[in-house]
Amino acid sequence: MIGIVIVAHGGLAREFLAAVEHVVGRQPGIRAIAIDPDSDRAAKQREICEAADRVDTGGGVVVATDMFGGSPSNLSLRACAQEDRHIVYGANLPLLIKLAKSRHLPMAEAIQRALMAGRKYIDTISGPIGTVVPMTQARTATHG
């Protein structure tokens, strides 16, 4: 089974994990790590590596971070230096839920499904009340 470490700014990682477990139930093998402005970077890097080691039961590890180029992603690089460890950045709740539900799959397939879910549920809704149309549908209808 794929292990998951969620690393994000402030309390976001803990809240992401709480929301995932609210939707899909308790999830063993997932850890959440907060990166605060005053965090000791070396200590947090060790914490991420140790968390990845703890959740790695042989199926690999995905470290999900909130954004590319931020401290959570940068500090996760060492934890993902091993084979079968991957960083997925730009995490949102649909991505994390799909990843949690796909942990039994091969790594590449689980990541692909998670990325697709994360992208699918980013949109905007517009239109008069009662005729609300997601923008992706509106674009498809007008641009074929």
Image (tube, grey):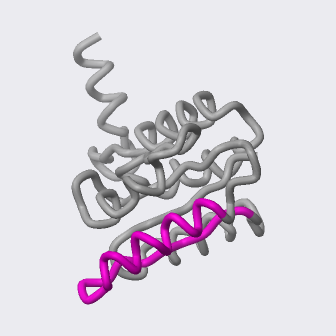
Q: Position of residue 119 (x, y in %)?
A: 41, 39
> Is residue 126 toward the left or the right of residue 6 in the image?
left
Please report the bounds of the magenta region as a residue range: 29-53
Q: Position of residue 80 (x, y in %)?
A: 47, 49
Q: Residue at point 30% right, 47% down? A: 124
> Is residue 24 toward the left or the right of residue 14 in the image?
right
> Is residue 57 toward the left or the right of residue 144 in the image?
right
Considering only vertical position in the picture, is 30 above or below 91?
A: below
Considering only vertical position in the picture, is 19 above or below 142?
A: below
Residue 22, by quadrant, is bottom right
User: In the depicted view, which residue is nearer to us: 94 or 102?
Assistant: 102
Asked if the stretch drawn in magenta spans residue 19, the answer is no
Q: Position of residue 50 (x, y in %)?
A: 57, 69
Q: Position of residue 129 (x, y in %)?
A: 34, 52
Q: Residue at point 66% right, 54% down? A: 3
Asked if the stretch drawn in magenta spans residue 32, the answer is yes
Considering only vertical position in the picture, is 20 above or below 114?
A: below
Q: Residue at point 34% right, 76% down? A: 42
